Structure formats: structure tokens, C-alpha cells
Amino acid sequence: MRRKRGQVGGSGTSRVIPGGTPAVIASAILIMALMFTGCGEKEPATNAVKVGYLRSDLHQLAYYVAGEKGFFTEEGLDVKEGGVFNAGPEEMSAFSAGELDMGYVGTAPAVTFAAQEMVDILIVAQINAGGSSIIVRSGLEAGDVSALKGRTVAVPGHSTVQDFLFRLALTEAVLGEDEVNIITLKPPEMIGALASGQIDAFVAWEPYPQMAVAQNVGWVLENSSEIWPHHPCCVLVVDRGFAERNPDTVRRFVAAHVKATEYINENPLESADMGHLFTGQDSEAVEAAMKNIEFVHELNVKGLQRYVEFLMEIGVVKVESAKSFCDTLIDQQFLPREN
């Protein structure tokens, strides 16, 4: 139907503006535009950051150090504790619910939740490399991993970095996965299970391995650095929308994280004391555990890609390419660059 002069709108919704001359129509459009100014505007940038991290996880000490040494304040940030979580999946669920802006978390939950499109995050920095161990119960003799044939071994969860590390160790020992009884336990439960003989060994991150040693219930068969040198472990992640709205804030947060990481490496004794306060664990155990952790901020992109390939092989992650997936998940632009 031919539209009458001064008529606007589509079929079935048209109306006539009285005195509908082009000038009047233009004025009406301008007035409507002014009336709705502000609708759809981007949220203003903020220096406030809601952060999540895992309870008693020594790998994530940099977060505590950055707060205690004032590095967040130096960067002009208002860091708020968004949640302390018992496990990585709990933390990623908080991201899904929009409760967190940034978080210190394990690679496994970050990757799996992102691959399943349950969160929209970016990995912006490494937190640590290494830092896990295979612990065997006291009284059980074992020259190497092959001695665990027919034994019960606990991992924190199937598809975790520790699970992958143990599978690598089995391959090196020419031992099939079906020749070991692999079960899942939360790390805090592993020490009691080891002491009672319910399990013969476990694979976990620090400080749990050294806690088992300090309590004389287990000993170190192999550190993860011997299985996969410099392997990625915990990462710093950010909600993608938050990063897009607040790139400078994210950059300053990462800068504070880098300062804290460097401080830990330059001040091991003081950092061990802070590790004791952060985890609430025995000072000697914490000091020993920190020797097994590489506190780093530079991302091990190839290592992360290798881990994603493992998750693809066991069917946990379904993506077309580990490389392309990592390319969209990892963003190194926020890391400080040397002049």
C-alpha cells in the first residue's frame, strides 16, 4: 500500500503525524532521539573488581600477597572478595551467575566450562606452573610409578590437570590405565584416606602433598615437574564482558598480579609466612610446598593447548581445534610488556 505523505511506520502500525511535512517529521524524530538519549549506552568503566579464588590453595598465593603488600591499591583498584570456593567448578558457576569479574582458578574448570559455553571468560595470565605430586602411603615401597600396579590411586577429579599428569606418568611407566584403580577424592579427604589405607597413593596440588609428608602418612614418589616440566596449572581469568568494558582496570589488576608474583619469588621466606596465613597450614609444610611450585605470570600457551587436546581425546571437550579454541580463550594483551 502506498504510504500517505507524513505517514511513518510499517504495515499495520502506521500512523499519521498531523502537518506531516518533512521538516516536522525530522523534528519529531530528533525529539524522540533526545527523549531516549542514554538508552543502550555502555556501562561506565569501573575500578571495582569482584574476585574469586580457591580456599587454602597455595598456588593462588599471589592474590593474597597483592592485597597484603598493597599492590592492588597502588594500581588504583577497589578489589572486593566475590567468593572463596572449595572447588573450581563452584567458582566457575559463580562466573555463570554474573557474581564475579575476575578469578584465580585451576585450568581444568576454566577450560571445561568455557568449552561447554557455560561461561564467557578470558585467560589473561598464568598463576603457577608445576606444584603437584604423586604421594604414596607410608610403609608402601615403590621405586617408581610401575609399583602402583593393582593399587588404588586418588585424583581430584577425572579430566583435571592432576588426572592428566597421572596418565602421563602411567604411560612413562608402561602401565595401562586399567591396571590401576583410579578413584576421585577431594584433596582435603585424601590425607585421611591415605592414613587409613583406603587408598595407596594420591595425586594433588600443594600444600596437600607436603601436608601428608608432614603428618608422616605419605611420601613423595614423583613431583609433577618431573612428569611434565613447567606444566600449566592455575590461571587468572576475567569475564569477557567485564574486560571489554574495563580493559584498563583488567590491565592494572594483571599488573598487580605480576608484582605479587615477582615479590613471592624475590622474598621466599616472607612469602612462606604469608602462605601459612593464607592457607592456615603448618609453616614447615608450606615452606616445603612452595619449593615445588613455580610462581609465574607468563602464559604457557602450548601447554594449555596440549591439555585441551587431552580433554578432546577423552571426550570432555568437544571443539573443532585445540589451537583455535585456545586462540579465543587466551588473551595476552593485558600482560605488561618490557620496553
Image (cartoon, rainbow, N blue to C red):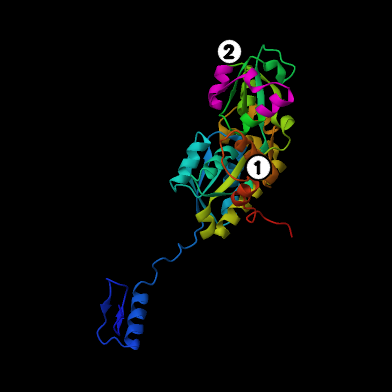
Instruction: Report the predominant secondary structure element of the magenta stretch.
Output: helix
- On whether residue 18 falls in the magenta region, the answer is no
Q: Nearer the viewer, residue 230 or 261?
A: 230
Which residue type carries mark 1? Answer: Leu
Tell me the element at label 2: loop
Quarter of the image containing the C terminus? bottom right
Few, some or many C-alpha atoms within 10 Å of disc 2 (few <14, some 14-19, many ≥20)? some
Q: Residue furthest front?
A: 1
Q: Amino acid at mark 2?
A: Gly
One can see residue 124 in this view: no
- The image quadrant that residue 17 belongs to is bottom left
Residues at discs 1 and 2 in contact (Cβ within 8 Å): no
Q: Which residues are magenta?
A: 167-195
Tag on residue 155?
none
Q: Which dot, 1 or 2, sits closer to the camera?
A: 1
Q: In the rendered image of this protein, does residue 183 appear above or below residue 25? A: above
Q: Is residue 185 magenta?
A: yes
> Residue at label 2?
197
Looking at the image, which residue is at 60% across and 56% down? Answer: 251
Tally of numbered discs: 2
Between the C-alphas of marks 1 and 2, the distance is: 35 Å
Q: Secondary structure at mark 1?
A: helix
Q: What residue is shown at x 58% (from left), y 15% (from top)? A: 195
Return the x and y of residue 81 as percentages of the image width and height: 49, 45
- Tell me which numbered mark, 1 or 2, is placed earlier along the sequence: 2
Along the line of sight, which residue is nearer the eye, 276 or 156? 156
**Which residue in the protein does label 1 denote?**
304
For residue 28, above or below residue 132: below
Tell which of 222 and 32 is nearer to you.
32
